[in-house]
Image (cartoon, coloured by chain):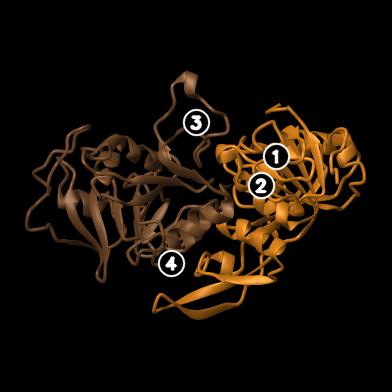
Chain colours: A orange, B brown
């Protein structure tokens, strides 16, 4: 078994228009730069991205936004990502803002075959009650808002509490950045570059890992593997860092 | 009017809420600075929601690792005993009630402990980030913030006008003017910053303030950087 591809472009060559892609990374750590660049150089458009912060100013997914290739984003944070904020507020893209832990768990659940789960996060807010703007009009008016979700009471540690039903996320593709991967796709992450990567890896039908270093099968100690290769379909070596 | 505590002094005051053995999450910005003022003899483990448990101080240039950052994307170090986890595991720690204390910033806090800190409709959307998970998941939530907004409007209010981050989640608020518990009767002023009067607080607060200084007042204790203060 050898899941390696020659380069990032070859690994995403079959990416169709309208595909959904979950992308690992938090800030500039653990971002699959080479795969994102390959998508930019390829032709696919009308994409849905599932990502914590959709790139940072002038790098990563922000460049894909800039080139108008993204239609819809599921993310938790905008912060100082100017292009992301601009496109959202100008109505150029649809954005589903999701609490960060809910986003991670929706991906993990998607990969684990769980359709939905109840969490206390967001109860009593627009996330549960509905009303988070999904799409703005050109004049800044809200065209579409998130729907109200089911809220139920459960007992936890002997205390009754309200929880909101959140649905899992699965994607056509997932892009992962690892420190080391072997030819089976077993991957090791470094420090806080792990972040969303194991969660997005599980949620994708075709998960592509770009690793700083690709090694032969047997080199990685099974005890040290963070992401088992069963969640990975393609592997590319990419030394590339923040561009 | 006297401004009371500086932002750094507010961080020093908040650090006094830390207890030995706490696992604590510090929000982006001013809350992060609380880590610089952990009182002597107190051992806490700082969690960052991007997947670091056991954050240490800012690295020297030689020790900088671009893959080792906190949730504010600042370069950090990992202390002995640290661990790295995925985002879903990191939020299991938060949501599962394993974090003892979360210190967050806020745009508004209501007298029933509602927290608003993620969006100003029509003006700015920062996004939600980890704030909603921290607000409901941490065992205790302390807000540190300026008492008034930049435009002079009140931030401690009867009921939030901004979209909520969490309902009834805040336990305590520390501002440049003083320390407030959220109790059954609403905001309870327990401590004043030096030079600040109860009236100063009342005119700057958009809700009723009950005054209840503890019997052993902390008031007499000047908050200063690197000065510890026993209650």
Q: CA distance from mark 3 to mark 1?
A: 19 Å
Q: Is residue A5 left or right of residue A223?
A: right
Q: The disc numbered 3 marks a residue on which chain?
A: B
Pointer 2 residue = A197
Q: CA distance from mark 2 to mark 3?
A: 19 Å
Q: Which mark is residue B75?
A: 3
Residues flagged by tags 3 and 4 on a common chain:
yes
Q: The disc numbered 1 marks a residue on which chain?
A: A
Q: Assess disc 3: are there few (<14), some (14-19) or many (≥20) residues with their C-alpha within 10 Å of its C-alpha.
A: some
Measuring from the top left, give residue A57's x and y in whole percent: 65, 33
* Residue B61 vertical placement versus A184 (above, below): above
| Mark 3 secondary-structure assignment | loop
Q: The disc numbered 2 marks a residue on which chain?
A: A
Q: Assess disc 1: are there few (<14), some (14-19) or many (≥20) residues with their C-alpha within 10 Å of its C-alpha.
A: many
Q: Residue at x 44, y 21 (%)?
A: B60
| Mark 1 secondary-structure assignment | strand
* Residue B191 vertical placement versus A181 (above, below): below
Q: Is residue B112 left or right of residue A220?
A: left
Q: Which mark is residue A177?
A: 1
- Work out whether mark 3 precedes mark 4 in sequence or the reverse, and give the earlier one: 3
Residues flagged by tags 2 and 3 on a common chain:
no
Q: Nearer the viewer, residue A52 or B20?
A: B20
């Amino acid at each position: 078994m050898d899941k390696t591809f020659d380069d990032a472009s070859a690994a995403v060559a079959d990416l169709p228009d309208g595909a959904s892609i979950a992308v690992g990374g938090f800030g500039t750590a653990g971002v699959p730069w080479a795969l994102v660049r390959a998508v930019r150089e390829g032709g696919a458009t009308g994409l849905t991205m599932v990502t914590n912060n959709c790139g940072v100013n002038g790098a990563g997914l922000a460049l894909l936004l800039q080139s108008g290739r993204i239609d819809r984003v599921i993310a938790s944070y905008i912060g100082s990502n100017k292009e992301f904020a601009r496109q959202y507020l100008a109505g150029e893209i649809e954005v589903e803002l999701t609490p960060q832990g809910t986003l991670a768990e929706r991906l993990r659940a998607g990969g684990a075959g769980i359709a939905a789960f109840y969490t206390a996060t967001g109860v009593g807010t627009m996330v549960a009650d509905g009303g988070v703007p999904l799409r703005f009009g050109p004049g800044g008016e809200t065209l579409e808002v998130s729907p109200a979700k089911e809220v139920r009471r459960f007992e936890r540690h002997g205390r009754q509490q309200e929880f909101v039903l959140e649905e899992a996320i699965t994607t056509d593709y997932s892009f992962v950045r690892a420190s080391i991967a072997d030819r089976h796709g077993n991957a090791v992450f470094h420090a806080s570059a792990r972040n969303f990567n194991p969660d997005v890896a599980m949620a994708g039908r075709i998960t592509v890992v770009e690793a700083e270093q690709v090694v032969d099968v047997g080199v990685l100690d099974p005890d040290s593997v963070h992401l088992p290769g069963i969640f990975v379909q393609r592997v590319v070596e990419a030394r590339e860092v923040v561009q | 009017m006297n401004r009371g505590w500086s932002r750094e002094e507010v961080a020093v005051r908040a650090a006094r809420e830390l207890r030995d053995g706490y696992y604590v999450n510090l929000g982006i910005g001013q809350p992060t600075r609380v880590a610089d003022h952990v009182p002597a003899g107190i051992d806490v483990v700082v969690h960052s929601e991007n997947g670091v448990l056991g954050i240490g101080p800012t690295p020297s240039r030689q020790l900088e690792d671009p893959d080792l950052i906190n949730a504010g994307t600042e370069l950090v170090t990992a202390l002995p005993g640290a661990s790295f986890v995925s985002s879903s595991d990191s939020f299991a720690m938060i949501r599962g009630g394993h974090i003892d204390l979360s210190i967050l910033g806020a745009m508004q806090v209501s007298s029933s402990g509602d927290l608003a800190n993620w969006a100003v409709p029509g003006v700015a959307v920062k996004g939600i980030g980890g704030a909603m998970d921290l607000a409901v998941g941490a065992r205790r939530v302390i807000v540190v913030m300026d008492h008034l907004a930049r435009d002079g409007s009140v931030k401690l209010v009867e009921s939030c006008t901004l979209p909520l981050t969490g309902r009834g989640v805040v336990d305590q608020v520390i501002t440049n003017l003083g320390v407030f518990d959220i109790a059954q009767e609403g905001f309870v002023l327990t401590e004043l910053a030096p030079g600040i009067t109860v009236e100063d607080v009342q005119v700057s607060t958009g809700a009723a303030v009950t005054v209840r200084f503890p019997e052993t007042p902390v008031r007499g204790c000047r908050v200063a950087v690197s000065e510890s203060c026993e209650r």
